Image: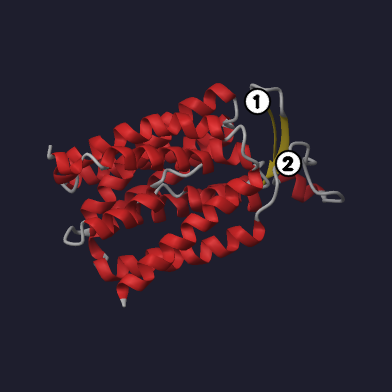
């Protein structure tokens, strides 16, 4: 392993810290960096390295969040299973996307998502009603009500449509594997805004789901032979993210939900603009 690659270790530390803080695997930061640093590499290798790193980040972060008791396991297991078919299809589709088109799709998606996140950012909620006031019986029948108490005694109460949650997870699984990202930048706002999850529960549960999704996509890349050339680089970045994920989970106790979302939006906007400009 060349000494010139050691910079990947602190990169992993930074990605693990920020990614876990906002509930993302960090792939949305790692992929554009790898695209810029390794312009000659194909998209299959870039996405395979990133997905493997996302797995280690999400696994470490999930362990930290589990100690905080912020993961909604019942919902997370259902969503994780739903990501599997999408993750397999996405990983297999990467080979059919050119590098130029990959950069454009990735950048445009991140810009749109960043603007949406900044506008819709809100503070955490802990005592939301289990269903909207005045909702009919049919609406209530379709909603899953959840209540969670974390390690610090904070009580979270919320309700969501499980069918919508499953559909979103399939989409996240596909897009995440296709682009080599964790998908947290989509999943966290979807859980928070569309499914009414408290932000801190959304970030923790998203991390748990990402671990399963990224592991599935990584296995597909290994079976396809795309991962072999990136194993050494992956090991360095993964070593950093495992430590960074623990730090990010600790920092999440001190950062409000609104600023977690807006921090994610700023990072996504910067990366998205950089990638779109690289195409022209």
Q: Quadrant of residue 149?
A: top right
Residue 119 against residue 52 in the figure, above or below: below
In percent of width and height, residue 31 lies at 33, 53
Residue 90 visible in the displayed image: no
Q: Quadrant of residue 217?
A: top left
Is 111 situated left or right of 134 in this image? left
The residue at 73%/35% (across/down) is 157
Q: Name the image colouring.
A: secondary structure
- Give SS at disc 1: loop
Q: Which mark is residue 125?
A: 2
Residue occupying the point 78% across, 37% down: 127
Q: Position of residue 257 (x, y in %)?
A: 64, 43
- On the image, the x and y values in percent for residue 276 come to 38, 71
* x then y, percent, for residue 95: 23, 60
Residue 139 in view here:
yes
Q: Label 1 belongs to which residue?
A: 150
Q: Is residue 80 left or right of residue 121?
A: left
């Amino acid at each position: 392993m060349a000494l010139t690659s050691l910079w990947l270790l602190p990169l992993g530390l930074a990605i693990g810290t920020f990614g876990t803080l906002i509930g993302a695997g960090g792939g949305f930061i790692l992929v554009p960096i790898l695209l810029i640093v390794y312009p000659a590499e194909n998209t299959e290798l870039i996405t395979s390295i990133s997905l493997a790193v996302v797995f280690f980040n999400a696994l470490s972060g999930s362990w930290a969040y589990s100690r905080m008791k912020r993961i909604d396991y019942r919902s997370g297991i259902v969503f994780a299973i739903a990501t599997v078919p999408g993750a397999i299809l996405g990983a297999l589709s990467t080979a059919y996307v050119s590098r130029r088109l990959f950069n454009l799709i990735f950048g445009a998606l991140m810009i749109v998502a960043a603007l949406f996140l900044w506008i819709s950012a809100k503070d955490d909620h802990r005592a939301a009603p289990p269903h909207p006031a005045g909702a009919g019986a049919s609406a209530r029948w379709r909603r899953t009500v959840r209540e969670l108490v974390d390690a610090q005694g904070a009580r979270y109460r919320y309700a969501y449509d499980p069918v919508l949650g499953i559909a979103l997870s399939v989409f996240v699984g596909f897009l995440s594997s296709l682009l080599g990202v964790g998908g947290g930048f989509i999943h966290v706002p979807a859980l928070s805004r569309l499914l009414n999850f408290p932000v801190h529960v959304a970030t923790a549960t998203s991390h748990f789901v990402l671990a399963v999704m990224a592991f599935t996509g990584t296995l597909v890349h290994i079976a396809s032979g795309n991962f072999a050339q990136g194993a050494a680089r992956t090991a360095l970045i993964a070593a950093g993210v495992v430590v960074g994920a623990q730090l990010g989970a600790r920092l999440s106790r001190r950062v409000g939900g609104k600023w977690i979302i807006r921090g994610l939006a700023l990072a996504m906007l910067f990366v998205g603009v950089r990638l779109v400009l690289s195409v022209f």
